[in-house]
Amino acid sequence: MQKDIHPRYEPVVFRDRAAGFAILTRSTRGSDATVAWEDGNTYPVIDVEISSASHPFYTGTARVVDTAGRVERFQRRYRRG
């Protein structure tokens, strides 16, 4: 591999403030903001608006769309005969 052409791949904390959820992982993305992690080390932190802890699909709070009404309207509109 060639040297100095790849981005740095370092530990980063991704934090979802709305859900109070944070995860330490590795990423090529960095940040100037830092946070003290549970292990006592300080890592760059990236705040995200939505994560698996707050997304309706993963939390089970997704609203069910009235698909039956949509199908019936479609059939009435494009009925043959």
Image (cartoon, rainbow, N blue to C red):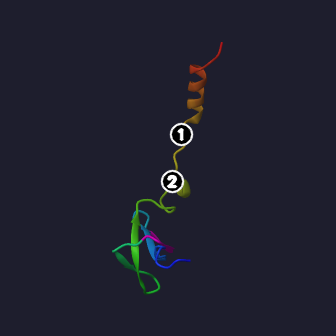
Instruction: Kindly state the secondary structure of the residue where label 1 is placed.
Output: loop
Q: Which mark is residue 20?
A: none
Per the picture, the main secondary structure of the magenta-coloured stretch is: strand
Viewed as shown, does residue 53 lie left or right of 17? Answer: right
The region drawn magenta spans 21-29
Image spot of residue 38 (x, y percent): 46, 82
Residue farthest right in this picture: 81
Image point 36% across, 77% down: which residue?
Answer: 34
Residue 36 showing in the rendered view: yes
Image spot of residue 20 (x, y percent): 43, 68
Relative to 61, is 81 above or below?
Answer: above
Q: Which mark is residue 56?
A: 2
Image point 43% across, 86% down: which residue?
Answer: 41
Residue farthest bottom in this picture: 40
Q: Quadrant of residue 12?
A: bottom left
Which amino acid type is marked by label 2? Answer: Pro
Image point 52% across, 61% down: which residue?
Answer: 52
Image point 49% across, 56% down: which residue?
Answer: 55
Instruction: Kindly state the secondary structure of the residue where label 2 is placed.
Output: helix
Q: Quadrant location of the C terminus?
A: top right
Which amino acid type is marked by label 1? Answer: Val
For mark 2, does the 10 Å Cα neighbourhood hold few (<14), some (14 to 19), or many (20 or more) residues?
Answer: few
Residue 60 showing in the rendered view: no
Quick check: is 4 in the magenta stretch? no
Image spot of residue 14 (x, y percent): 44, 70
Q: CA distance from mark 2 to mark 1?
A: 13 Å
Sooner in the amino-acid sequence: mark 2 or mark 1 = 2
Residue farthest top in this picture: 81
Could you say which is closer to the camera, residue 35 or residue 21? 35
Q: Which mark is residue 65?
A: 1
Relative to 77, is 44 above or below?
Answer: below
Image spot of residue 39 (x, y percent): 47, 85
